Amino acid sequence: MDMSSVLQPNVALEINAVTKVPSAKIIKAAKAAGIKFTLGTNNAGIHELDRLDYSLRMVEECGLTIDDMWFPKAARERYSIKPKIVEEIAATNLTQPKKVDLSSFVIVGNGGVKILITDNDGMITRGKGVSQEMLAGYQEIVNKYLEKTSTGNPDKSDKFYWKSDFLSEEDWTRLYAIYVQMNRSQQKEQMIKFYEPTPAIGWTNPPNQRSYDYWIDDKKCHIWIDGKKVDNSALNYNKTTHFVGNFSSSLRRSGGKPDEYRVDLWTEAGNKKFNEQFFEQPVSIDKLLEIEPGIIFLVEIIDNKPIHLLLFAEPRHGWMMMKSTGEKTSIVSNGAPTPSTYHPISKLP
């Protein structure tokens, strides 16, 4: 098929749901040539107006996105439909995380010796394990927020009282940078933990449909697809099955309001690239801090089984209680109290 006749402004190739043309082979060739598409029917009767099964199936099979679709000039102006260029789609009230001063990434060990948290070039290597001096420095920061630890109670419950649920930016970044370098056994022992996007390890984590629909209309939600910010309406041109990973995070440390949040969605190709940059090699501090991790506080240990409270970035979820029993971890309640009110300081034993 000669593509030159449709490779021009204001001309598009219709994917017709009734006649089922063009084929996937032609659509893919047209996409590769930079041709835009529309979806349609023959409009021979009212019964055809809601039938786009073939068109939508071709969109999914051929990997078409909103950038591959053609819109009339009036629609582009009315709905501000623009190419996915980062400079154009970045939200004006959000900024990128500030560049980190590596000189601040130190802890002071015994005798006042300064220990650099990152490598000399500012890189972080995950899971390599950290020194006892660094573990001690981590605990010193944690202790600033810990009011009291009540252990050895008759009911076999150890309780942890927290002064605050919100860490200063400096403490948060230092703890996070140290935490990701700990090995699993070291992380398991901490009273403040972090969780972040999970690496691709042969399974997918697509968003559920209920959350997906909610994000489209939620003005507090900001959407990133494969690391680029897009308008929430872009989700209307995709399906949950287009994505293999998703993660919600706070925007407080990158210029957002307290109740605003970020949702990252990754396609298979985008998730592979993110995985390579974020998990499979040393990562820079700046890259590490692009997505704010969730935070977890230990609040109780009952019969050697820890209970944590973790904060989900989306305001509708808030704090949740997580209970660990051996190798199994489960969410046991939504809308849990914050760590600083779980065991009220005013009721210290």
Image (cartoon, helix red, strand yellow):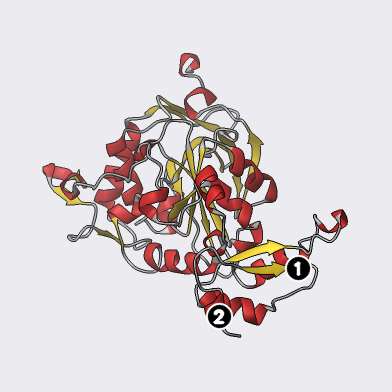
Residue 286, x across and y down, in percent: 29, 53
CA distance for labels 2 and 1: 22 Å
Query: Of 309 and 254, which appears nearest the observer?
Result: 254
Residue 162, image x and y in percent? 43, 27
Q: Secondary structure at mark 1?
A: helix
Does the image show residue 81?
yes
Count the labels in the image: 2
Q: Residue 54 — which label?
A: 1
State which quarter of the image contains the N terminus: bottom right
Read off the residue under disc 2: 3
- Image check: 48 left or right of 274? right
Looking at the image, which is closer to me, 163 or 166?
166
Mark 2 secondary-structure assignment: helix
Drawn side of residue 252 relative to residue 214, left or right: left
Left or right of 101 in this view: 129: right
Q: Quadrant of residue 211?
A: top right
On the image, the x and y values in percent for residue 78 come to 54, 43
**Left or right, 349 with reference to 110:** right
Q: Nearer the viewer, mark 2 or mark 1?
A: 2
Amino acid type, mark 1: Tyr
Look at 58% across and 70% down and name the residue there.
202
Task: Classify mark 2: residues with Cα within 10 Å, few (<14), some (14-19) or many (20+).
Answer: some
Asked if 29 appears above or below 131 in the picture, the reply is below
Based on the displayed image, in which of its 4 quarters is residue 217 positioned? Answer: top right
